[in-house]
């Protein structure tokens, strides 16, 4: 079954990989379009959550540095 691997890399070298399986029947344009739409529906919330979590962690680290 085809799948898409999405890796988010931070400037400090840390990374997080998400794997999104696609339907196995990608033989026509309609099936491909549907698989892409499913990927976007599954991937975009994961990407947003990862980026928000990273931003929150960075902000918490900055607060710790400023209080020390």
Image (tube, helix red, strand yellow):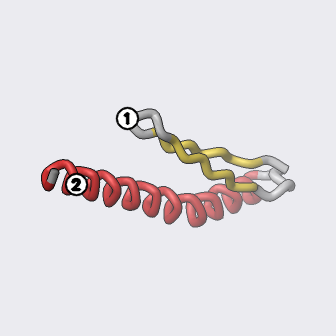
Instruction: Tell me if residue 43 comes above or below residue 6 in the rendering.
Output: below
Q: Is 15 on the left or on the right of 35, as rendered?
A: left
Q: Looking at this view, is 16 or 40 the one in front?
A: 16
Q: Looking at this view, is 31 or 35 the one in front?
A: 35
User: Residue 47 at x, y = what percent?
Assistant: 48, 56
- Where disc 2 sits, the SS reads helix
Mark 2 crowdedness (10 Å alpha carbons): few <14, some 14-19, many ≥20: few
Instruction: Tell me if residue 65 comes above or below residue 44 in the rendering.
Output: above
User: Residue 60 at x, y = what percent?
Assistant: 27, 58
- Where disc 1 sits, the SS reads loop
User: Residue 57 at x, y = what percent?
Assistant: 34, 56
For residue 51, which numbered disc appears in the image?
none
Q: Is 17 on the left or on the right of 21, as rendered?
A: left
The residue shown at (73%, 59%) is 30
Instruction: Tell me if residue 29 comes above or below residue 15 in the rendering.
Output: below
User: Residue 10 at x, y = what percent?
Assistant: 41, 39
Q: Is 28 on the left or on the right of 7, as rendered?
A: right
For residue 64, which numbered disc appears in the image?
2
3D distance between C-alphas at marks 1 and 2: 19 Å
Q: Is 7 on the left or on the right of 57, as rendered?
A: right
Q: Quadrant of residue 49?
A: bottom left
The residue shown at (80%, 58%) is 23
Which label's residue is closer to the chain start, 1 or 2? 1
Residue under numbered circle 1: 11
The residue shown at (85%, 54%) is 24
The residue shown at (85%, 50%) is 1
């Amino acid at each position: 079954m085809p799948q898409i691997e999405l890796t988010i890399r931070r400037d400090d070298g840390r990374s997080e990989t998400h794997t999104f399986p696609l339907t196995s029947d990608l033989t026509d344009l309609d099936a491909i379009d549907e698989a892409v739409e499913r990927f976007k529906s599954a991937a975009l919330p994961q990407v947003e959550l990862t980026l928000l979590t990273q931003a929150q962690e960075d902000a918490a680290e900055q607060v710790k540095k400023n209080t020390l």
